[in-house]
Image (tube, coloured by chain):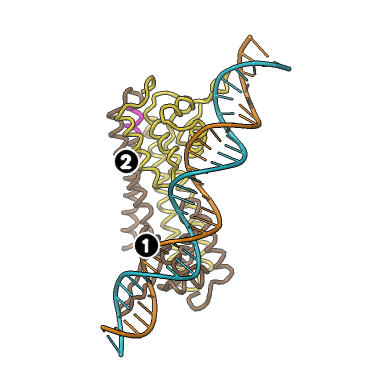
Chain colours: A yellow, B brown, C cyan, D orange
Amino acid sequence: MSNKAPTGAERRFIEDVARLLMPWGVPQAAARLYGYLLLFPEPVSLDRIAADLEMSKSTASVAARLLEKYTLARRHGQRGSKRVLYEVSDNYEGMLIEQNRLLDALAELLKQGAGIAARGKTRSRMEEMAEFHMTIRQSMEAALKRWRARKTR
Amino acid sequence: MSNKAPTGAERRFIEDVARLLMPWGVPQAAARLYGYLLLFPEPVSLDRIAADLEMSKSTASVAARLLEKYTLARRHGQRGSKRVLYEVSDNYEGMLIEQNRLLDALAELLKQGAGIAARGKTRSRMEEMAEFHMTIRQSMEAALKRWRARKTR
DNA sequence: CAGTATATTCGGGAAATGTCGAATATGTCA
DNA sequence: TGACATATTCGACATTTCCCGAATATACTG
């Protein structure tokens, strides 16, 4: 790629990625763009994206910013130009970190919920669940930390 | 609860849970039901759910089965009756397991994608990402395992 | 400052999703 | 089997989401 439009195999890959992500609520355009960026060896312009992926430029723009929000893509402003280039981010932890936030919030809520629970049964259930979420969240965080360390050694 | 409708604090809890889950694509009815079940100390009927949560019975039915699909709720068939009762599942791992499946599939796709990548840069990027996803998935699995062990000791 | 290149926002239309009440299916008991 | 209780599906409607092309905003160049 990079000088020509995606080949057959590449197109298939892009659609596979999209099929995987879409059921999780990622819009088709963004999902396809992610697969595309994965294959693209350098930052790429919106016009190029729109052409290769056969979507309107406005769609490409919002899709790219959506990926950016999830830290799945990175924006490269070009000096001396309004032009913006996107490439896939090396920070693939973004989604997991976001999930950790959910686990945290849920644990918090459950702890609080345990307080208002009428019966002991529900109270202990919620306490246990809160603990579970905290535990999982912590080991995920630890795993991320290990990974980062491993990468830089 | 259990004999009366949710109190003010309980209602607030239910809505808090819903607010947390809905941005993640969980429909309002299912999200509220989850909060409700968390508070309810015993299996509860669809009629009761519909009444307490002020939603139609059909809505309650589909919401309950949705939670069941995600293993967040458990169905209790009652002997000698068509009646179905739901309670929150003690298997809160369901969502995480599902996520692990996604990580797996993504890693698989990336490994395959590395094969068709034209340039070395994209290839090694995908290989690294695949490894990352595998790593995270494994430590999550390990954490789940530890949790299960800890719970039964 | 005018002109150009580019990204972003806007409004509309199409498609998907969520919810409801009514209709239907299914299981249980006598 | 018939009658009943209950869950599930169906069709309609409202709401939301997505995507497009046109209009607008923004930044850079000369």
Front residue of this view, candidates A112 and A11: A11
**Residues at discs 1 and 2 in contact (Cβ within 8 Å):** no
Q: Secondary structure at mark 2?
A: helix
Front residue of this view, candidates A139 and A38: A38
Q: Is residue A136 magenta?
A: no
Q: Is residue B125 magenta?
A: yes
Q: Main secondary structure of the magenta part?
A: helix
Q: Chain of mark 2?
A: B
Position of residue C14 relative to residue A9, above or below, is below
Q: Chain of mark 1?
A: B
What residue is drawn where x is 57% and y is 20%?
A81
Position of residue B3 relative to residue B99, above or below, is below
Disc sitting over residue B134 in the figure: 2
The span from disc 1 to disc 2 (Cα, nearest Å) is 28 Å
> From the viewer's perspective, is the residue at label 1 or at label 2 nearer?
1
Could you say where residue D27 lies in the image, as x and y percent from the top left? 62, 23
Asked if residue B33 shows in the view, the reply is: yes
Asked if residue A109 shows in the view, the reply is: no
Q: Amino acid at mark 2?
A: Met
User: Quarter of the image containing the C terminus of chain B?
Assistant: bottom left
Question: What range of the chain is rendered magenta?
Answer: B123-128
In this figure, which residue is indicated by the disc labeled 1?
B68
A59 vs B110, left or right, is right
Could you say where residue D25 lies in the image, as x and y percent from the top left? 65, 30
Neighbours of disc 1 within 10 Å: few (<14), some (14-19), many (20+): some
Q: Secondary structure at mark 1?
A: helix
Neighbours of disc 2 within 10 Å: few (<14), some (14-19), many (20+): some
Of mark 1 and mark 2, the one earlier in the sequence is: 1
